[in-house]
Image (cartoon, rainbow, N blue to C red):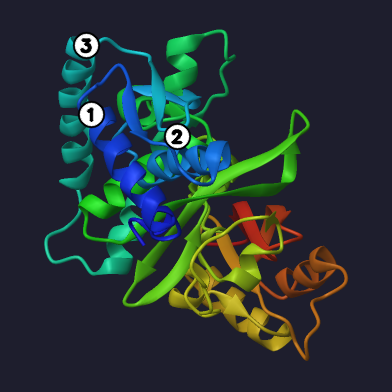
């Protein structure tokens, strides 16, 4: 999984990938390769594969890779955003920042616990910040690991690359996935998230959406932690990734926060309100293949049977995740 895009290339493209990756790691001003049979399309595939497979190669523009083609050789011209000495200094800073984050993972933590720890860290600390392309250095940083690790800011691509980098360092196979989002921003459906592997099973994780869903100083959102292809396809599309077939690996399944039917919802609310939880989050599952037509009405009816006095209601129409927040209870 860590070299997912490399594995999809032809043998001659893989040779070009290795040479380009080596050149970028050495801050080469140009990288020459034998001209590929696929021409410009092959060069673009190679450049994108190197970019997505290697989040640590972050000092050239992730959106600009010029090249020239001749009958025998082709030349890549990386657009370097940093001079080599400055890049090496930043590289040390990034390594230190990553090490500090990873040091918070408890010794002996299981794979899922590592994933959840990093997910929670990113949701709590990162700020989504889209910067204009004219602001060259900051724009570059927001699309790579530099922004999230240096200043805790970035966009979906930067978040996904940072997550892939740290997950791999924590021993979790992970990759960046590119595709489209149902929620279009500024007319652009482009989006990036992660696919990772836990105990031999693959899952999607979208840190960006959980980050942007979470209110400031509010509870962490887990709507997009460890989803299957079926769940992901409800609001993501046009992507290529390893098959994610496990529909029971999400945060809500693992934490016993899935409910199917009114009696299950009543039981969950009874358990949570007995603890006077300040917020309650759960995921609705279909009953006989169907979800409630009016989620809010179903939840309101169930809440009426509890000691909850007031609450704020939020529900995802695609993932069917419900959050009751700012809960106030009757009595003591």
In the image, is 42 to the left or to the right of 301?
A: left
Q: Residue furthest front?
A: 71
* Secondary structure beneath label 2: helix
Q: Which of the numbered marks, if any, corresponds to residue 255?
A: none
Whether residue 283 is visible here, answered yes or no, is no
Q: Which residue is mark 1?
A: 94
Image point 47% across, 29% down: which residue? 143
Q: Which residue is mark 2?
A: 158
Q: Which numbered disc, 1 or 3, marks the residue that appears first in the sequence?
A: 3
In which quadrant of the rendered view does residue 20 lie? top left
Q: Residue furthest right?
A: 293
Distance CA(mark 2)–CA(mark 1):
13 Å
Image point 51% across, 80% down: which residue? 248
Distance CA(mark 2)–CA(mark 3):
20 Å
Q: Residue furthest left?
A: 107
Q: Which residue is mark 3?
A: 86
**Which residue occupies the foreground of this view, 82 or 299?**
82
Mark 2, other Cα within 10 Å: few <14 / some 14–19 / many ≥20: many
Residue 60, position in %: x, y? 37, 22
Above or below, 146 against 288 in this view is: above
* Secondary structure beneath label 3: helix
Image point 55% across, 56% down: which residue? 279
Q: Which numbered disc, 2 or 1, marks the residue that appears first in the sequence?
A: 1
């Amino acid at each position: 999984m860590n070299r997912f895009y490399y594995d999809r290339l032809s043998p001659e493209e893989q040779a070009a990938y290795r040479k380009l990756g080596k050149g970028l790691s050495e801050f080469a001003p140009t990288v020459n390769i034998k001209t590929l049979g696929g021409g410009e399309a092959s060069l673009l595939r190679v450049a994108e594969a190197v970019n997505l497979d290697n989040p640590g190669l972050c000092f050239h523009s992730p959106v600009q890779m010029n090249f020239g083609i001749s009958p025998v050789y082709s030349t890549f011209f990386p657009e370097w955003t940093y001079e080599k000495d400055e890049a090496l200094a930043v590289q040390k800073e990034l390594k230190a920042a990553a090490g500090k984050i990873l040091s918070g993972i408890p010794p002996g933590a299981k794979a899922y616990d590592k994933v959840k720890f990093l997910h929670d860290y990113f949701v709590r600390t990162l700020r989504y910040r889209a910067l204009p392309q004219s602001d060259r250095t900051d724009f570059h940083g927001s699309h790579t690991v530099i922004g999230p690790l240096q200043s805790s800011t970035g966009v979906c691509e930067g978040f996904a690359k940072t997550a892939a980098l740290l997950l791999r360092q924590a021993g979790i196979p992970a990759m960046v996935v590119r595709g489209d989002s149902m929620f279009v921003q500024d007319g652009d459906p482009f989006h990036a998230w992660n696919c990772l592997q836990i105990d031999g099973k693959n899952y999607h994780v979208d840190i960006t959406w959980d980050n942007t869903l979470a209110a400031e100083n509010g509870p962490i959102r887990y709507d997009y932690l460890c989803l299957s292809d079926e769940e992901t396809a409800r609001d993501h599309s046009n992507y290529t990734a390893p098959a994610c077939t496990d529909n029971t690996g999400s945060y809500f399944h693992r934490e016993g926060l899935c409910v199917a039917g009114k009696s299950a919802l009543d039981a969950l609310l009874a358990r949570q309100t007995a603890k006077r939880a300040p917020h309650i989050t759960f995921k609705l599952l279909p009953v006989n293949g169907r979800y409630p037509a009016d989620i809010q009405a179903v939840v309101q009816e169930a809440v009426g049977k509890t000691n909850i006095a007031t609450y704020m209601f939020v529900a995802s129409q695609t993932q069917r995740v419900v959050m009751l927040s700012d809960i106030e209870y009757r009595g003591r």
